[in-house]
Amino acid sequence: MTDQEVNIDKNIREIKRSLPEHVTLVAISKTKSNEAIMEAYEAGQRIFGENRVQELEVKQPDLPKDIQWHMVGHLQRNKVKYIAPFISMIHAVDTPRLLREINKQAKKNDRVIDCLLQLKIAEEDTKFGMDATQIKEILASENYSQYENVRVRGLMAMATFTDDKDQVNREFKTIHNLYKDLKDPYNFDILSIGMSGDYPIAIENGSTMIRVGSAIFGDRE
Ligand SMILES: *Cc1c(COP(=O)(O)O)cnc(C)c1O
């Protein structure tokens, strides 16, 4: 592990200091140890994100109960039940059936789970997510209006992994425009865009929630 070369406390404080007040930092702790997470916790961080259900299940019981866990990765429907008792937000809702399953499992746990709908903006076709039409269809659907145990608070996306800042800027503008259209009609208040390499561009394009891993915890193996 190269953990000892990374100053997690300093990274957290510097990133937080640089953020406008309306932007929330989600510390992405995937592959990182509980010790590393506790270092961020001691620096005041309370929102952590993971991208695998199994890792969340292992980490959550051993860490402080006031941590708000966000699931940021692709989520399979048959795994929702494992995180429904404790998850505070699910970022990457990419099908109507997934949203329905989250509502069902949240109800079983007598909870309301915050969700974001994932827009596919990246050019590589390996990325998950929906197009704008599919997102609008969910929001306008009969089912959606009856869900009592999910609260869709906005949109999430990942930009193409590229050094081309113009392209990233273009992609973030696309999602920001959709977000602006849907914000008032659907009471949205969260736009989750921006990772270690592109969060300043995301903030310029209206991000209210950034998901930062390696810039806090160092590179992953
Ligand atoms: C890993 C991950 C991040 C954080 O990536 P970094 O480049 O390490 O900041 C953000 N969002 C999602 C969905 C991820 O899987």
Image: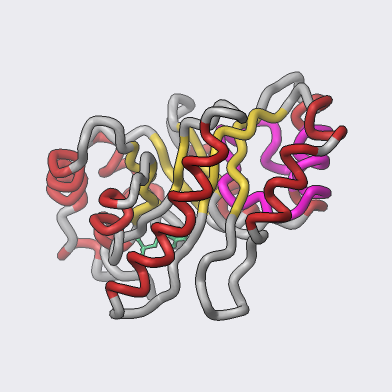
The residue under the point 17% across, 51% down is 11
Image position, residue 129 (x, y; %): 64, 61
Which of the image's four quarters has the C terminus? bottom left
Q: Observer-nearest residue: 40 or 12?
A: 12
Image position, residue 3 (x, y; %): 25, 63
Question: Farthest right residue?
Answer: 142
Q: Quadrant of ligand 1?
A: bottom left
Query: Which range is magenta?
Result: 80-105
Q: How many marks?
A: 0
Image position, residue 205 (x, y; %): 33, 51
Coloring basis for residues: secondary structure
The residue under the point 13% across, 46% down is 14
Residue 188 vs 18, above or below: the answer is: above
Image position, residue 37 (x, y; %): 35, 46
Horizontal side of residue 54 vs 106, given as left or right? left
The residue under the point 36% across, 56% down is 194
Q: Quadrant of residue 46?
A: top left
Q: Observer-nearest residue: 139 or 197?
A: 139
The residue under the point 60% across, 29% down is 185
Q: Quadrant of residue 19?
A: top left
- Residue 85 counted in the magenta span: yes
Q: Observer-nearest residue: 69 or 54?
A: 69
> Does residue 54 appear in this view?
no
